[in-house]
Amino acid sequence: MRHARDTPLLPGLSPVSGKAVEACFDGGSLLSDAGVLALREIDIRLNMAVRLAACIADTRQPDRVRHSLADIIRFRLLTITCGYEDGIDADSLGGDPAFKMALGRLPSATDLCSQSTICKRSIRCTFFE
């Protein structure tokens, strides 16, 4: 049963792990970077992270991969657009519920990739790769 809301819902958010996502501005469960959910919708429609990942050879050992290249790129794109341009904040943001949901994970899921994972991948990428 829905409760009457004084503020409107942010419409059009895609489900996360089959669960509906509702974002409103009524002061309930607060997230400081909830705008990342709107950015997720842009990535879903443009498929940016997947398209960029397809341009880069992933030379990692498949049995040791915990985070897909597309997820690493998506997380980095989202952190940059939210103002975390240097990547140092990846360790703390990896556990943030909004960022997890922006990568299609439930808030209770394991953390996203770390700053060192992003750094290792960016060092290995070259312009000609």
Image: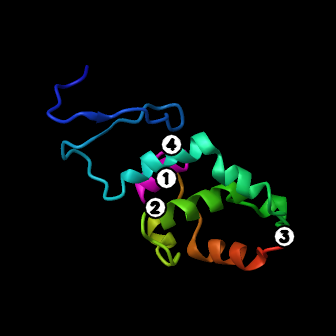
Q: Which residue is mark 1?
A: 100
Looking at the rendering, the stretch of residues picked out in magenta corresponds to 94-107
Look at label 4 and name its amino acid.
Glu
Q: Of label 3 and label 2, which has the lower sequence position?
A: 2
Look at label 2 and name its amino acid.
Gly
Q: Mark 1 touching mark 4, by CB under 8 A?
A: no
Residue ID at (43%, 47%): 37
Q: Mark 1 touching mark 3, by CB under 8 A?
A: no
Vertically, is 124 above or below 52?
Answer: below
Report, in whole angstroms, how far the alpha carbon at label 1 lies from the one at label 4.
14 Å
Which of the labelled discs sits on residue 41, or is there none?
4
Position in image of residue 22 (x %, y %): 35, 35
Visible residue check, residue 95: yes
Q: Mark 2 touching mark 4, by CB under 8 A?
A: no
Secondary structure type for disc 1: helix
Q: Is residue 52 left or right of residue 100?
A: right
Q: Is residue 68 left or right of residue 78?
A: right
Residue ID at (36%, 57%): 33
Position in image of residue 72 (x %, y %): 64, 62
Secondary structure type for disc 4: helix
Q: Which residue is mark 3?
A: 129
Q: Does 106 appear in magenta? A: yes
Report, in whole angstroms, how far the alpha carbon at label 3 lies from the one at label 2.
30 Å
Packing grade of label 2 (10 A; few <14, some 14-19, many >=20) is: some
Which of the labelled discs sits on residue 95, or is there none?
2
Look at label 3 and name its amino acid.
Glu
Report, in whole angstroms, how far the alpha carbon at label 4 lies from the one at label 3.
28 Å
